[in-house]
Amino acid sequence: MMKPLRSLFQPNILLPIAGFTGVIVVWWIIALFRHEMMPTPPEALIKNLDFILNPFYHRGPGDLGLGWLLLASLRRVCIGFLLGAVVAIPLGIWIGLSHGAWLALNPIIQIFKPVSPLVWLPIALAIFNSAEPSAIFVIFITSLWSTIINTAEGVSNVPQDYLEVAQILEMPRWKQLVKVVLPASLPYIFTGLRISLGIAWLVIVAVEMLTGGIGIGFFVWDEWNRLNVSSVFLAVFVIGLTGLVLDYALAKLQAIITHRPTRA
């Protein structure tokens, strides 16, 4: 009986609870001073009970539960992120292996990397003339830079001893890539992927606020226009928890593939 109770007081459980409690307390204090606009945590919980208890309701066109909106946003992020990974990882490997590729592509990467992802939205709308592919395109662009840079860094940092042993064993070039370069670079590649996925999830909310339609970002904007701040707070927690789950899942996948524990 005492063992489960003692486990609750472990730092890895107690400290996150303390941090979360601190956020709730700060929110509550601010709400007391701005009560005409800001709900307290209990008020927000009561007002959002329908969203929480019925996340997958469907009451007609445009009136969907939060679960459906979340799935719509996740679908866009997954498509754009996977397309970005398919392009970024081979490019990063090429840049890491070839000094000529680095000279040719590094200036392009350094120019476009600092550009806000939202700047690409008008260009995407001009190309596709539709919000859905435009949102996916912005996520695709967003997912490129961190993955390319980290992959190239990982490939270029493969220990020279590994490559020399592979050459002594007369491994073909493709086999060196598969058996030596890729396994040694995987921690860097996954670091880039995790950063890219986090940014992609952040950006999709802003993109949906601008383009409208179905998604968690449009839900935030729509609820704010109705001055329903309680639902905005709910969306903040849903977005944050979803981002946490996405990063945790990718960290676990990294641990399985690389056979190394990660700090998820």
Image (spheres, rainbow, N blue to C red):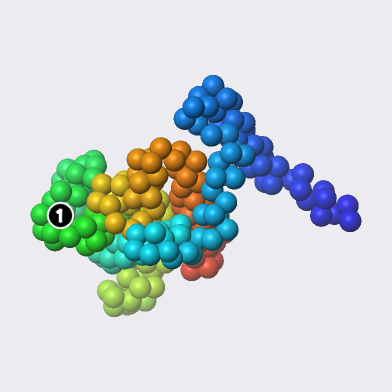
The mark tally for this picture is: 1
Of residues 171 and 257, the one nearer the viewer is 257
Residue at image point 42% right, 64% down: 59
Of residues 154 and 67, the one nearer the viewer is 67
Q: Is residue 196 visible?
A: no
Instruction: Tell me the quarter of the picture where residue 157 sits.
Output: bottom left
* Amino acid type at mark 1: Leu
Q: Residues within 10 Å of mark 1 (few under 14, many from 20)?
A: some
Q: Is residue 144 shown above or below 210?
A: below
Does residue 212 appear left or right of residue 30 in this picture?
left
Q: Is residue 224 visible?
A: yes
Residue at image point 47% right, 30% down: 37
Does residue 177 appear left or right of residue 109 in this picture?
right
Instruction: Tell me the quadrant of the picture where the N terminus can be found.
Output: bottom right
Residue of label 1: 125
Residue closest to the far top: 33
Residue closest to the far left: 126
Of residues 132 and 2, the one nearer the viewer is 132
Q: In x, y percent, where is residue 212? A: 28, 52
Q: In x, y percent, where is residue 258? A: 49, 65
Q: Is residue 42 shown above or below 172?
A: above
Q: Is residue 135 shown above or below 114?
A: below
Q: In x, y percent, where is residue 4? A: 81, 54
Residue at image point 58% right, 44% down: 45
Q: In x, y percent, where is residue 234? A: 50, 46
Does residue 8 appear left or right of residue 175 in this picture?
right
Dot 1 lies on which element? helix
